[in-house]
Image (spheres, rainbow, N blue to C red):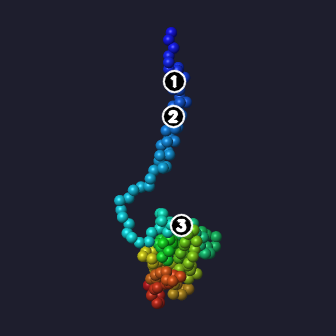
Amino acid sequence: MQTSVVPDLAHTRPRPVHWLATAAAMCAVLTAAGLLQPGAATASQTAPGPGPVSGGAPEAAPDASAAVYPLECGGAKSVVVKQGSADLDGDRRPETVAVVRCASGSGTPPSGVYVLTRPARVVATLVDPADRQSITDFAVRDGMVSATLLGYSSPDVPRCCPDEQEKVKWQWQGDKFVRAGRPAAQSM
């Protein structure tokens, strides 16, 4: 019998453990390839102007549901009923404006309008719930907050039926929000 010049390869017969090791190695390679891919390409051009603060992706607006509002609800929870985000003060970081009121089983509790910065912190109150007003037609756009305030001319007016309406806007000027609106509330 002749001996082979090549070493005996009988121990190289594939067994299930070999297939499992190969499959695990392939999964690791595919996972690493998926994680190390370049970002998505875009074919659009951006207009010149101020970009993100740190040169990366734009900063996310504060989460209105994560904030703690200066609102007394007597054991009930506060509810964010409307919200909008924009860079209102020109610092290239978006603020969130939230319309918040206490959760109630019936009726329409008064609302507050609050401005939030990161990390979901109230920095300004545009409408105080103590003013006993409801908010409709709420919008945040072009660096301005606008809303229609519904209120009551006297304590005798039923809380179901506001009898005053005022359209207002707020805009950042200098170091504070300035309110512009009709000089006097109008009856509905």
Seen from the viewer's position, the closer of residues 47 and 72 is 47
Q: Which mark is residue 22?
A: 2
The percent coordinates of residue 91 (x first, y second) are: 50, 74
Instruction: Look at 49% across and 83% down and name the residue there.
Output: 173
Name the residue type under label 3: Asp
Q: In the rendered image, which quarter is residue 122 located in?
A: bottom right
Seen from the viewer's position, the closer of residues 33 and 127 is 33
- How far apart, in angstroms, are the residues tagged by discs 2 and 1? 14 Å
Instruction: Look at 47% across and 46% down and name the residue there.
Output: 33
* Residue 80 visible in the snapshot: yes
Q: Quadrant of the C terminus?
A: bottom left
Label 2 or label 1, whichever comes before in sequence order: 1
Identify the residue position indicated by label 1 in the image. Answer: 13
- How far apart, in angstroms, are the residues tagged by discs 2 and 3? 46 Å
Secondary structure type for disc 3? loop
Q: Is residue 76 left or right of residue 27?
A: right
Question: Is disc 1 surrounded by few (<14), some (14 to 19) or many (20+) residues within 10 Å?
Answer: few
Seen from the viewer's position, the closer of residues 126 and 4 is 4
Q: Which mark is residue 63?
A: 3
Instruction: Look at 50% across and 36% down and name the residue there.
Output: 23
Instruction: Nearest to the eye among marks 2 and 3: give it.
Output: 2
The percent coordinates of residue 119 (x first, y second) are: 57, 68
The percent coordinates of residue 138 (x first, y second) are: 46, 75
Secondary structure type for disc 1? loop
Q: Is residue 177 above or below residue 48?
A: below
Name the residue type under label 2: Thr
Secondary structure type for disc 2? helix
